[in-house]
Image (cartoon, helix red, strand yellow):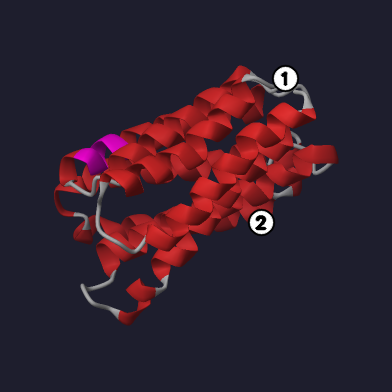
Amino acid sequence: MPIPLFWTLFIPAAACAILYLTMTARGASPVRTLTKTLSVALLAILAAFSDAPILLAIALALCAAGDAFLSAETEQTFMAGIGSFAAGHIAYILLFLTHSHSDLDLLSDNAWIIAALAALGVVMAVVLAPRAGDLRVPVLLYIPIILGMGVAALCLPATGMLVWAWPAAAAFIASDLTLATEKFLLPEGHPAMRVTPYLIWPLYWGAQVGFLLAFT
């Protein structure tokens, strides 16, 4: 992609991300939804017009759709958001596994990370299951998908721009873990909820930028 075109799309995406950060703890509104969605949708457009694999653009677009759904903050749109993000993670998994430098043998070199992710998945399932209510099934199905995305990222060598892939995957997992803690574990009015929105968003958007850097 020509450098001017890259910055023409990335700068407004970053501006939307920064603007959304100032609104992340506020209630739902059309401006908040639009700002959140554009911050990732513009990255998807950037990926589509670059030499990046089409799966990157698809994954980013699905995550942007997930942002639009989640920002409405209703139970129905939350379900749609989970579905969109699950599909986005699957697109990322396919992207990582089909990349020309992907190597399954690298998994054995990162066995301790995989073990840690597996343990994290068990803890998340045990802790969230009794607290997720009607969302128990989709939440439990979502856990192995996002952790699978993290494992798939370990198939990529930490060389060149691909070095961004695993940190981005780890940041994505951390953002989702913090979001789950905020939604299902923290009681209303808990002091931590003054901080969690400002952790979730930078981790999440930073993860998307990391993936963009890794594959463009």
Q: Label 1 sits on what residue type?
A: Asp
Stretch of the chain drawn in magenta: 77-81
Image quadrant occupied by the N terminus: top right
- Residue at the farthest right position: 160
What is the crowding at mark 2: few (fewer than 14 residues within 10 Å), some, or many (at least 20)? few
Marker disc for residue 51: 1
Residue 34 on image: x %, y % = 37, 40
**Residue at (64, 30) in percent of width and height:** 96
Badge 2 is on which residue? 112
Given this view, does label 2 or label 1 mark the residue nearer the observer?
A: 1
* Quadrant of res 161: top right
Tag 1: Cα neighbours inside 10 Å, few (<14), some, or many (≥20)? few
Q: Residue at x 66, y 21 (%)?
A: 98
Label 1 sits on a secondary structure element that is: loop
The amino acid beneath tag 2 is Trp
Percent of width and height locating residue 119: 49, 58
Is residue 155 visible to the viewer in this orientation of the structure? no
